[in-house]
Amino acid sequence: MKGLDMDIKISDIKIEYENTDISNLDDFIRKYSQDSRTSVQGMVKKAIKNLDKYNMELARIEKMKEYERKYCEYEYICGIDEVGRGPLAGPVVAGAVILPKDCTILYVNDSKKLSEKKREELYDIIMDQAVSVGLGFVDNNRIDEINILQATYEAMRQAIGKLTVKPDLLLNDAVTIPEVSIKQVPIIKGDAKSISIAAASIVAKVTRDRMMTELSDSYPEYDFAQNKGYGSAKHIEAIKKYGPTPIHRRSFISNFI
């Protein structure tokens, strides 16, 4: 096998494979594709599989930039999304995220499609790379006062107002926000179609989940750390047994009390 050093130890090749960045796996594959040793060929096959997955993810992320490319004449494009419309307790939280032009953050997606661990990892990356991030919070009392839809709009306006850079365009997940003068583009299922909206979805989701986990310490009977305020069986049972807490949405739990 001309040009191939068969004296390289398999253990050294394994270390090389483990230390090779996924974007450079094609070099590893070319280097060892002619090595006939079974274990080396196993690593090559694994590298090919992982590289294929990586390239598929790159293609998916490029597709998620469709709207950002379509409106590329706008300098600052902001994705908007909310989390917490359906829970029986806690706030609704909105996120507003402006990413750099042609930003590539792999695995960004609708927050509901990601594991908690992956959301936490992506949250840190988004917060590090974003041009600006704004968050809006509307509590349960305000939700009861004006209804969840209006509370969602209010949280979104808050999030926009907390950005350190004024956006030129808003990409929203399905809605048009009242009382906002900035040009808006509502996108159905936008958190799965726009990298900016998906980033806002992740930031809002992680922020709200952390809040509900902290509140679980004050109200341990309601299992907020697990259900995040949604109507799980254990949560509903606790409402019936202990009554509502100060963070429950009274307009959402009338059937249980």
Image (spheres, rainbow, N blue to C red):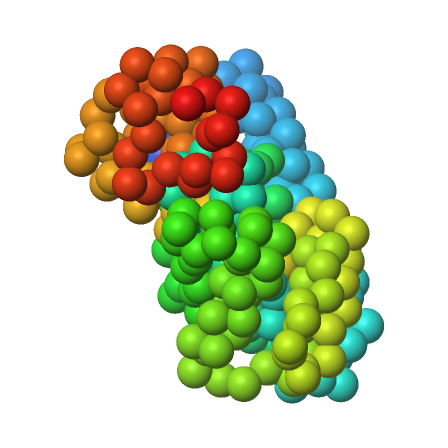
Q: Nearest the camera: 243 or 115?
A: 243
Residue 137 spot, x, y in % from top left: 41, 59
The residue shown at (42%, 19%) is 236
- Quadrant housing the C terminus: top left
78 w.r.t. 17: above or below? below
- For the N terminus, give its image quadrant: top right
Q: Position of residue 209 (x, y in %)?
A: 38, 41
- Which quadrant would residue 152 be assigned to in this image? bottom right
**Residue 8 falls in image quadrant:** top left
- Residue 188, visible in the rendered structure: yes
Coordinates of residue 38 in the picture (x, y in percent): 54, 14
Q: Reply above or below: 34 against 156.
A: above
Residue 31 in sight here: no
Q: Residue at x 29, y 34 (%)?
A: 245
Q: For the image shown, how many numbered marks are present on the structure? A: 0
Q: Give the residue displayed 74% in from the left and 55% down from the top.
A: 174
Q: Residue at x 44, y 14 (%)?
A: 233
Q: Nearer the viewer, residue 175 or 198?
A: 175
**Direction right: furthest residue:** 70
Residue that lies at the very extreme toward the left in this rendered image: 218
Q: Position of residue 75 (x, y in %)?
A: 65, 86
Q: Viewer-proximal residue, 52 or 102?
A: 102
Q: Where is 242 relative to 117, above or below? A: above
